[in-house]
Image: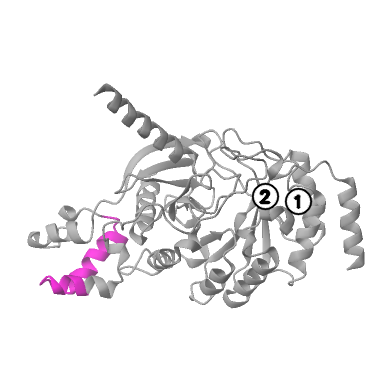
């Protein structure tokens, strides 16, 4: 261990100047020392209309029976939704007409309205902004790769984690999404991919990542219910492979332990971004509650319970967290908890407009990765998508909301 410490000190001595998050204040801050404040409380109250996806199959049967319809209709209705991706009762010809209005109102209200769609990366990336029932907006991104088609899904409108380099984090938390609102993003993406809208990848959605807007584990109940709907076969759900679903978190250590006991072997992704508390306290405000050591202990426990290797997400920010000594420190933290349980995904930062930070240089990115690999850590640079269409999560929704507000002010002015 003495040699490891010595090597880190040597790397530190050779390091370039380190930029700190407090070198320049966040927008609207009154002093350079102002720190973002995390929030677990939604600004907007109220629930989305109840939807079929919010309910287990048994609950769907009970609701139909209470309305005077036979329980077996729940299987038919559910297969239309999860197998045929159909949400229009008028097209469900095996349901009696007397039942269709009830189904439309009780089980299949329209939860998402497309507000904007942008296509990037030669047609292999489609980014959508969805308007919700209360006027809030969320994003989802559909991405085609050679061997898979992946949806990046949102679990909250906005985010309360206040990470200063994240566009969504600067929005604050508006509210949690319902299970139905999450699942509707998946169903819409399935329809899009099966229609052949992507230029790359299989014409069937295979992977889902909770890496869109929001901190998934803060919306724990709805997210876990959504996982059940994604994984369980029709008529219970879509029948996706649990191994192809990833839940990302900035570090809700107690909820990682709780998720491990659910029995769904989804992949856990930890948005670490710094291996030392000194820097991570500034980059990830939630680190004030759950320090790096506690977070990695929880992640290791998740691996032990589920057998699923944990992904360590690490956005490489120029001169801030991309030093080779930090790569060595990260390797030491992971190796101290065993070998083979974690895989590091360095990600070139997708900067938000006006940000004081930018992505690492190619040379420093390679040096960081090589330092990890030389320490025995499996490392893969994660592909970035949509840099030409406000790729960082939250940018497009923010722009749509800004235009909506501007249009509203224009209407008032013209009255």
Image height of 80 relative to 410, above or below? below
Image height of 401 relative to 60, above or below? above
Tag 1 near tag 2, CB within 8 Å: yes
Q: Earlier in the sequence, mark 1 or mark 2?
A: 1
Position in image of residue 58 (x %, y %)? 27, 75
Position in image of residue 173 (x %, y %)? 46, 51
Residue drawn at 21 percent across, 66 percent down: 76
Q: In this orientation, does residue 257 appear?
A: yes
- Quadrant containing the N terminus is bottom right
Nearer the observer, 128 or 137: 137
> Magenta segment, which residues?
62-86
| Mark 2 surroundings within 10 Å by alpha-carbon count, few (fewer than 14), some (14 through 19), many (20 or more) | some
Q: Is residue 389 left or right of residue 12?
A: left
- Quadrant containing the C terminus is top left
Q: Secondary structure at mark 1?
A: helix
Decide whether residue 74 is among the magenta residues: yes
The residue singled out by tag 2 in the image is 381
The residue singled out by tag 1 in the image is 369
Its colouring scheme is one colour
Decide whether residue 139 is among the magenta residues: no
Position in image of residue 409 (x %, y %)? 33, 29
Residue drawn at 56 percent across, 36 percent down: 387
Nearer the observer, 270 or 286: 286
Q: Is residue 174 left or right of residue 69?
A: right
Real-space Cα distance between discs 1 and 2?
A: 8 Å
The total of numbered circles placed on residues is 2
Q: Is residue 415 left or right of residue 70?
A: right
């Amino acid at each position: 261990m003495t040699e490891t410490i010595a090597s880190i000190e040597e790397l530190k001595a050779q390091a370039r100047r380190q930029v700190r998050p407090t070198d320049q204040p966040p927008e609207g801050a009154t002093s350079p020392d102002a720190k973002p404040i995390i929030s677990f409380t939604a600004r907007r109250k109220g629930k989305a209309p109840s939807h079929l996806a919010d309910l287990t199959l048994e609950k769907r049967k009970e609701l139909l029976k209470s309305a005077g319809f036979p329980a077996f209709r729940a299987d038919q209705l559910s297969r239309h939704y999860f197998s045929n991706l159909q949400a229009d009762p008028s097209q469900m010809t095996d349901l009696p007409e007397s039942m269709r209005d009830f189904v439309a109102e009780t089980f299949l209200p329209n939860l998402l309205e497309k507000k904007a769609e942008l296509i990037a990366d030669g047609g292999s990336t489609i980014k959508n902004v969805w308007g919700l029932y209360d006027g809030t907006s969320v994003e989802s991104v559909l991405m085609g790769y050679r061997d898979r088609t992946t949806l990046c899904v949102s679990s909250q409108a906005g985010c309360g984690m206040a990470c200063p380099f994240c566009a969504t984090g600067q929005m604050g938390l508006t509210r949690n999404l319902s299970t139905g609102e999450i699942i509707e993003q998946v169903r819409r993406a399935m329809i899009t991919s099966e229609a052949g809208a992507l230029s790359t990848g299989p014409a069937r959605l295979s992977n889902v990542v909770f890496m869109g807007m929001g901190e998934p584990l803060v919306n724990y109940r709805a997210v876990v219910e959504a996982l059940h709907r994604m994984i369980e076969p029709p008529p219970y759900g879509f029948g996706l492979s649990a191994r192809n679903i990833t839940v990302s978190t900035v570090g809700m250590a107690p909820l990682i332990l709780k998720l491990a006991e659910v029995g769904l072997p989804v992949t856990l992704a930890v948005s670490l971004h710094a291996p030392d508390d000194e820097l991570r306290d500034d980059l990830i405000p939630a680190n004030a509650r759950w320090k790096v050591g506690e977070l990695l202990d929880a992640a290791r426990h998740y691996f032990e319970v589920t057998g699923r290797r944990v992904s360590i997400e690490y956005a490489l920010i120029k001169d801030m967290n991309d030093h080779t000594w930090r790569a060595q420190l990260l390797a030491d933290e992971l190796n101290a908890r065993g070998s083979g349980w974690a895989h590091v995904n360095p990600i070139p930062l997708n900067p938000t407009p006006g940000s004081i930070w930018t992505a690492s240089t190619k040379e420093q990115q390679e040096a960081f990765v090589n330092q990890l690999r030389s320490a025995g850590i499996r490392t893969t640079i994660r592909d970035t998508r949509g840099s030409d269409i406000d790729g960082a999560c939250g940018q497009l929704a923010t722009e749509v909301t800004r235009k909506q507000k501007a249009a509203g002010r224009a209407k008032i002015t013209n009255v």
